[in-house]
Image (cartoon, rainbow, N blue to C red):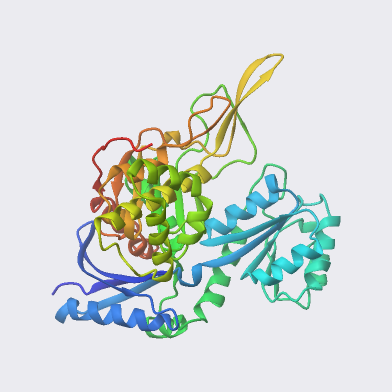
Amino acid sequence: MPDPALLSVDIGSTFTKGALFVPQGDDFALKAQAAVPTTVDDLSRGYDQVEAALKEAAGPDGIGRAWFSSSARGGLKIAAVGLTVDLTVSIARQAACSAGGKVVRAYSYRLTRAEISELEALAPDIILFTGGTDGGHERSNLLNAEALAASRLTSIILYAGNAKIRDEVMDRLRDKDAVAAANVMPEVGEVRIEPAREVIRRVFLERIVDGKGLSRIVRRVGTLPKPTPLAVYDLVRAIPEVLPEWDDLGVIDMGGATTDFYSNTEPGHADASVLVKGLPEPRIKRTVEGDLGLRVSVLALAASESLYLAARCASEGIEPAVFDAYVASVAARPESVPATDLEARCDAVLAGACVRAAALRHAGRQTRLATPQGVFRVQRGRDLGRLRRLVGSGGYLSRCRDAAVLRQACLGPAEDPEDRPLLPASPKLYSDAQYLFPLLGNLVTDHPAEAARTAVRQTVKMEPTRSTS
């Protein structure tokens, strides 16, 4: 008798997607897929619709176990508070992004009254409060604890700073919803984000699951959800572990609300003569850009990438007024899809903007430094030049077979030898052809090898096209 199918569902900001997987040897066979517009008022209704469609497709063999993820609500909103942008705030971003959250604002040094008011208006799910090595700087942390305690904030405050004053900080925050984790930087140059990541994951379950009907799904299927970005992160980690030839992997997941860039590669430069400055980069990294989305965030995308979009429209022969009208129509109806060739061309321009900007923000930079001892090259951030494969995922990039769109990740501004982004050089380009990466990411914890092999098997290589720089 055949094994029951495994159900995986991802509740996104625009669509709720699901698939049935059947074990076959060392990977999975895809039995059926279904998708419906996300029911934002009650997320469980969209889940139920997808599950019902897939139950029918499962037939008499039925469904065995179910997993699900969610990025509806725009993901877990995190505000980072630390001492300096280059140190603790940067580490806070690493912890937040690797746990599936999105940093909506970052603050350094002492919080001002204006910044507290801004935090109150933002109403983040978590304030990740860091700063100081263990036994190091104390004053700013204590003053910031007092400011947060006196605020109207109802956010969970996660303190992961100087451990020597943890008790005093937590005492000042005793009337807030405050928790503590180990210091994200106990010593200068030592990054330890896992304890903070675990607390962020727990908060995701407590805050997100209790809202918008997700708790009803949990009671029915008996499985807790993952944040969608964490599901993809886990898959990006698993693929090279199972298939070493797929090392040096990048994935761009472009959705309606955000564009996420994942890379699994050695972050340093291959040339030993390059001086690497700043915090050590993790091997696996995710960045998320809330203003780079093809539907829900299209107005923010149009504003943040206006110069690039204007240049691309000119090269494609798209009138500015026509393009602006299309952007407005998408903002009004995020669930819409292009109905004409012109609208499809507008979508391609928007998609290229998301890809390019996400790559530029994920990549590090290399500068030339002249000294009396000679000219040196200095790197800050990660070098994406090692990437051998780049996969496009998300609704648009999964359907796309035009390598020119994904190749925008390799085409930054005109190269300035004094200051250049460390973008991918010439990776092989692939499409997550059946949009399975988030769904397979849900299965990684229990079936890592099968999920990784299935993910790679269903990718489609994009053929080279003319440059669209």
Q: Quadrant of residue 231?
A: bottom left
Q: Number of marks in the image?
A: 0
Q: Position of residue 297 (x, y in %)?
A: 47, 62
Q: Is residue 354 above or below residue 426?
A: below
Extreme residue in the top direction: 373
Report the side of 372 relative to 443 (left or right).
Answer: right
Q: Quadrant of the N terminus?
A: bottom left
Q: In the image, is 174 to the left or to the right of 293?
A: right
Residue 360 seen in the figure: yes
Where residue 329 sits, quadrant-wise, is bottom left
100, above or below 305, in the image = below
- Residue at (54%, 71%) from the top-left corner? 204
Q: Quadrant of the C terminus?
A: top left
Name the foreground residue: 423 vs 209.
423
Judge whether residue 284 can be spotted in this image: no
- Whether residue 137 is situated above or below residue 372 in the rendered picture: below
**Image coordinates for residue 106, horizontal then vertical, percent:** 67, 56
Closer to the camera, 285 or 117?
117
- Nearer to the camera, 190 or 356: 356
